[in-house]
Image (cartoon, rainbow, N blue to C red):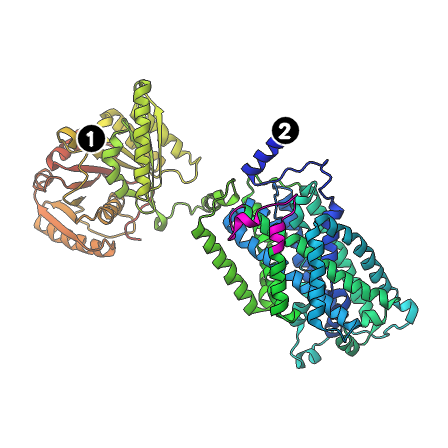
Amino acid sequence: MDIHTGFREKFRKQTGGEINTMEDKRLFSTYQGVFRPTILTLLGIIPYLREGWVVGHAGLFGAISIIIFAFAITGSTALSMSSIVTNSRIGAGGVFSLVSHSLGLQIGGSMGVPLYLAQGLATALFLFGFSEGWLYIFPEHEKLLVLLIAFAGTAAISLLGTRFIFRVQVVVMFVVIAALLSILLGPFRLGIIEENPILWQDFSNSASSGLGYWAIFAVFFPGVSGILVGSSMSANLKNPRVSIPRGTLAAWATACVVYILFACWYAFMGSSQELQTNFTLSVDRALFPELVLLGILAACFIAALSSLAAAPRVLQALGSYNIVPFSNFFCKLNRGEPRNATLFTLLLTLFILLIFGDVNAIAPFVTQFFIIIYFIINTVLAIEQQLNLVSFRPELRIPKFVPIVGSLLSLFAMFVISAIAGFLSLTFVIMLYSYLGLKKVSTPWETVQSGLFVSIAENFARRAERSGGIQNKRIWKPDLLVLLLEAKSVQGLSNLLSGLVKPQGSLCLMVLNEDRQSHEKEEKDKTVSRGMLRRFRRRGVPVLISQSPAKNLGEYACLVLSFLESRLALFSPNGLFICLEDISQHWLQRITKASLEAKISLIFLAKPKLKGRRQLLLKKYTGLILWIRDQSPSWEFSLQLSNVDFSALLAYKLKENLQLPLTLACVVQSDLAAQQAKQYLHEFMLIARLGKHVSVQVEKTSLTKHIAEQKSGALHIFGLGSSVTVSKKTMQNFNTLSQGTCLFVHDSGAGHESILV
């Protein structure tokens, strides 16, 4: 293996994409690999045997509107696919590869399997069409025998390889062009022109026969659903990023023009009644009828071959990523040809031909699978355009409304054509998606899906910030920045911190190193941090742990608050958590002032004075006590309770997460105040929805005495009040008296928290 081949193979494995060399003679050009198979599939049986029927039922303008609507769906899909192709490293499987690279193998696989089935069913569909044309010429022949012979011919050619199929396409292309010209030049031989063609049908006759506008559309649409055939040949193209957009769009535009020309031809070549009943009018009114018959047979036969060439390549790509059963069998290539996948597809086609005896039995499911694929392709591009990530740099940029319109039209067409078939097809795709999720199919490359939810969240957050709604009392949750001097401190705090933020909050732990550490100590701290990271995540707490050198924790905290005040970051912390013992009175005062200016809530932790290993922190508490200040003489409720909201919210979360009984404690100076306080706290307990195991304790005594009377080991929560002045000594005294853990909290001062909403 030379260096270039080795690089290509490594790149393919890492990215799932293919790098093909232009010098490889086994690969195909845009015309050979994309345009020709796509146009031959689009110009299958419908222009010859069904378009006249459409014009007869809908009128000229009605038929043209149906054509435009159908081609709007396939055209938007072709544009969306082309845009994605020019931004992706497309591998084997065409559209399956595109979607997998954008949204991962789970979604790509749930679309790739329907794509394979649709193309496999389309093979049988075109063989049914071939048999109809043959029986028109030779009505005495047995239909099943015709089908089996046609199947044997397609099987033999397909097993000879893709290059042989494409050689046959060269001959068929000339036959199809000659047949189309023979039809269009028919008036010059017969001189028959309808003087008063019906421009728009009122559908009265159609309604009486059970057909309406959308029923006619359902008959027509399967004929133009082969827009993805060329893209499935991606692994066999010299330059798929260029060939697929050019070939697909050129085939789509050519087919659209041909269909509109034929609609006009039919409108002027036969009456409405004649068009509705005579399916072979194009043969009867052609310049060379025999050539048209040959064109019908050739078009159906080569369309079946084109689908048979595309479907196995999708199956082979699915097998390469272990998405389907027996993947090891399907993923194998023999001289670049998916022989095993082709054999299985032939067996599937034969089974369908034997079980379903008519084209109408499988057409709805072929159509629905294709429409679901169209919907997914348009949706993928709409998502990538909306996110506007730097990784999305397509060479072909299209307006944002194109994929959105394509998605909506696809959904509409799905249920208009057949609501039952659409529901069954969607159910199949959803079940397949669930199966791949349970199978845990892993995507070996980065996808949009991996950052999709973050990007969407950021997008909506920016909009909320511009509208002033990012700070909403109802969606408040504690996102705490925790500043620590030692990594081992996290071990003792894990239970408390988890209780403060679960289930929707988050933690950002910053371990500061005041002095230069030795390499051994630094590595030890990193090991501790990694262990705590795993522990928090096992508890379901989103957490980030980082280390940073800093000479002074208080100074660092003020710098962080200054940054948060600038509101430069979305989803930034809304609370600061600091151990009281790690800062001095001077920095305590400055931090409090800075937090009020930044509108960030504060939590100061005072640990219990214990000996030995228990000095870290008690992991189990005897109870939870929320201290409420005496608000005499006015005990009133409002949606903003000064110095109560934040502390009460934290108390509620700790109560629920740590399963602790909560006590609302208050110290007053008079009997009247005691009565008012009890009534207030009982009503507060109900209005705030604090739940069960909540009690009220009001005493006419001093605060220090009442704190000392509480059980040791309790977790106390104190509100710091609206004043900027705080005293570390007072906090330490309360901590000593309580013989437990104390949290001294200060709300943001901006009204972000409310216990009563």
- Which amino acid does the dot numbered 2 rest on? Asp
Answer with the quarter of the image where residue 617 lies: top left
Quarter holding residue 152: bottom right
Identify the residue at horizontal 59%, vertical 60% (top origin). Answer: 369
Relative horizontal placement of residue 279, taking residue 7 as reference (left or right):
right
Answer left or right for 174 relative to 578: right
- Tell me which residue sits at (52%, 52%) in the image: 324
The local secondary structure at tag 2 comes to loop
Q: Position of residue 118 (x, y in %)?
A: 61, 59
Asked if 282 appears above or below 251 in the picture, the reply is below
Q: Which residue is mark 1?
A: 727
User: x%, y% of residue 375?
Assistant: 58, 56
Closer-to-camera residue (390/29): 29
Q: Residues within 10 Å of mark 1 (few under 14, many from 20)?
A: few
The residue segment tinted magenta is 321-343
Give the residue furthest to the bottom.
Answer: 208
